[in-house]
Image: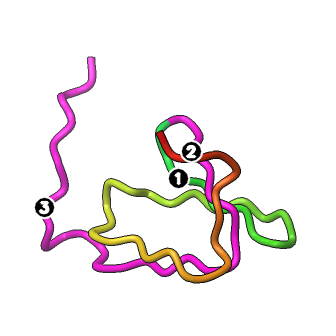
Amino acid sequence: MLPPLKPIAMKERVSMVFIQKGQIDVKDGAFVVIDETGTRTHIPVGSIACIMLEPGTRSPRPWD
């Protein structure tokens, strides 16, 4: 069995990530950004303090 997960302390997280001109989706509980060329980038939301969505970023469906 794996040990229980522990939260990452704020001082150990990346402070900000800027996402520009991409489509955001959620896959298996993680953010995935798809850029205009179709490249998929997984965003590790548990290790980031703030995600900034810049103009041109959109979601394929409304957020719940």
In the image, what residue type sits under mark 1? Phe
What residue would you read off at disc 1? Answer: 31
Disc 3 crowd, CA 10 A, few/some/many (<14, 14-19, 20+): few
Of helix, strand and loop, which one carries label 1? strand
Specify start and end residues of the magenta stretch as a single range.
Answer: 1-28
Mark before the other along the chain sequence, 3 or 1: 3
Quarter in which the N terminus is drawn? top left
- Residue in the image at 35% along x and 79% along y: 16
- Residue in the image at 40% along x and 71% along y: 51
CB-based contact (under 8 Å), mark 2 and mark 1: yes
Report the side of 11 relative to 39 (left or right): left
Judge whether 9 appears above or below 12 on screen: above
What residue would you read off at disc 3? Answer: 9
Which residue sits furthest right? 37
The label number, if any, that marks residue 59 in the structure image: none
Please tell me whether residue 41 belongs to the stretch shown in magenta: no
Q: Position of residue 42 (x, y in %)?
A: 58, 57
